[in-house]
Amino acid sequence: MKPKSYPSTPIFLIILLSIIVLLFQDTYWLKAMSQISSDSLVTWVSPSLTRIGLTESNGSTKNAELFAARGEYESFQIVVRASQTNLSNVNVSVSDLTSSNGQVIPRSTISLYREHYVPVNHSSPGKKGSSNSPLPPGMYADALIPFANSETGLDITGAELDAVPFNLKSGNNQPIWVDLFVPRNTQAGKYQGTYTVTSNQGEVSGEISLKVWNFELPLKPSLNSEFEAYNYKDKKSTQEILKHKLMPVVQLSKADQKDLIDNWGLKSLRLPFGSGADYNNRTMSPPPSIDDIKSVAEQYDSNLFLYSRFADEIDGSPELNEPIKQWARNFHQAGVSTAIAMSPIPELYDNGLGNGRSAVDTWILTPSSYNENLNPVSEVLAKGDNTWFYTALALDDYSPKWLIDYQPINYRIPHGFISQSLGITGVLYWRIDNWTGDPWKDEQVYSHKNEYFPGEGMLVYPGQKVGIEGIVPSIRLKWIRDGVEDYEYIQILKNLGRGSSALDISRKVGKDWKNWTQDINVLGSARQQLGEEIEKYS
């Protein structure tokens, strides 16, 4: 019998090798695609005081390490980058934070926002080589698109600008702002959680570590303030301002006032009286009567500190001295404090009532005006008057600025460290909703003689495009809030009898308007040192 016949060896080997090659190619292709997906979705975390460029290179830090007191907001950024290919259907989530003994900070206390880039086509005016100059034109992350409605906690859908999911072009970054609020009933200790970034091209996770200090920030901030919205004076918008530790200018019912006092930290309001005197007008109308002032004051909750800022920016107007005294006497006899944006002058150190009280209880100065009046400022502080600061435009080349194209530390450092170092007790900003026709696309809200001031007078955005009634915050407003919390840390340590130590730490970060650090690590280290000392001496 003949043996069974087989294909010749060469043909058999060719077929076998072909099958092996095809299998290898499939395996290699799948592995390569997996590698592309993994490399396309790149994430890292960044401190809150960094501004993430639209196309800047990758960071390397994967995990967030935070420190906060009870009743405090602490923030960081999750940066998503489309590295080698476009990303699609990107979403971000965070978990609860839990301690080793089972205590929980629920994820419902953590707010997420997609950072929205806006164009700065013309830089703010500033001297090149000065100690604080603006950055170049470009795209700046400033507006914040909330993931969820803060009142309902529900995801926002159907808005013109929706936070998530989003797509991302190759080579671009998309930072996510994470706002973590530590509930007031939280036990001190270390809490751990995670964040997760998902997309159609893969998934990445990282860790969140939070140390909760064994002390609490007060509901009502120690730093006084006045931040006015011209268009949005409703209760919801007022709450948004108060969440950022700032005082609004608003007239609401007593019931609404009480809710804002008890639950949101409202502590002071400006009464609606004005003399007409300002930078452009150096005449004053007759003052309201004492009875009229009392009648208006009765419309406000008795727990509020009431004041009148009845004139504004009137330096160099001696003809107004006597009218100012007349207004001040009526307010003082009605139990209302006075405040004016002007430099201290001896002619107003006595209101004429025989009690030695100044006509102006609170003198509000720009940094440059402060530096030009160091002796008068010392005199009024010694008398027991208050000093606040305010900023607008770019009036000098050394102090912190609030325009979009300045380094983030500009918005944070004056409220806490510089104010505490100089004995300043409040801050004024003329407006927070000075918008163009579409502020989500156009930041050139103010220009003068071919000079541009991007973002001047605007710290919030209209909420309609993102599915919110009222206003939504900017990143700059978050930085300002964190500065108010810096002030609180220093104040708490002072109240514990450690004033000298507190001010030593403060002055190493921001001694005065000309001497302040632009190194965020110096500020962060000082903040941690303050927390450790408060915990030690509490």
Image (cartoon, rainbow, N blue to C red):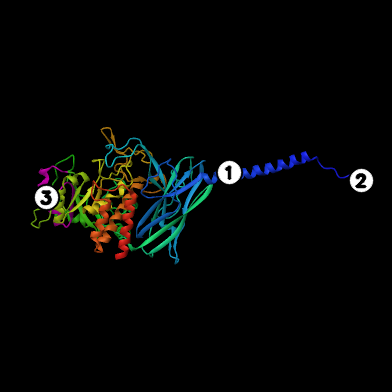
- State which mark lies toward you, 1 or 3: 1
The furthest residue to the front: 9
Residue denoted by label 3: 348
Residue denoted by label 2: 1
Residue denoted by label 1: 33
- State which mark lies toward you, 2 or 3: 2
> Residue 133's x, y, as percent?
29, 40
| Mark 1: secondary structure | helix
Q: What span is in magenta?
A: 314-343
Q: Residue at x 33, y 49 (%)?
A: 520
Which mark identifies residue 2?
none
At label 2, the amino acid type is Met
> Residue 232's x, y, as percent?
32, 47
> Residue 277's x, y, as percent?
17, 43
- Label 1, label 3: how far apart the Cα atoms are: 76 Å
Quadrant of image for the N terminus: top right
Residue 322 colored in magenta in the image: yes
Q: Residue at x 68, y 42 (%)?
A: 22
Residue 297 colored in magenta in the image: no
| Mark 2: secondary structure | loop
The furthest residue to the right: 1
Nearer-N-terminus badge (2/3): 2
Q: Is residue 292 above or below residue 447?
A: below
- Label 1, label 2: how far apart the Cα atoms are: 54 Å
> Residue 507's x, y, as percent?
25, 53
- Label 2, label 3: how far apart the Cα atoms are: 130 Å
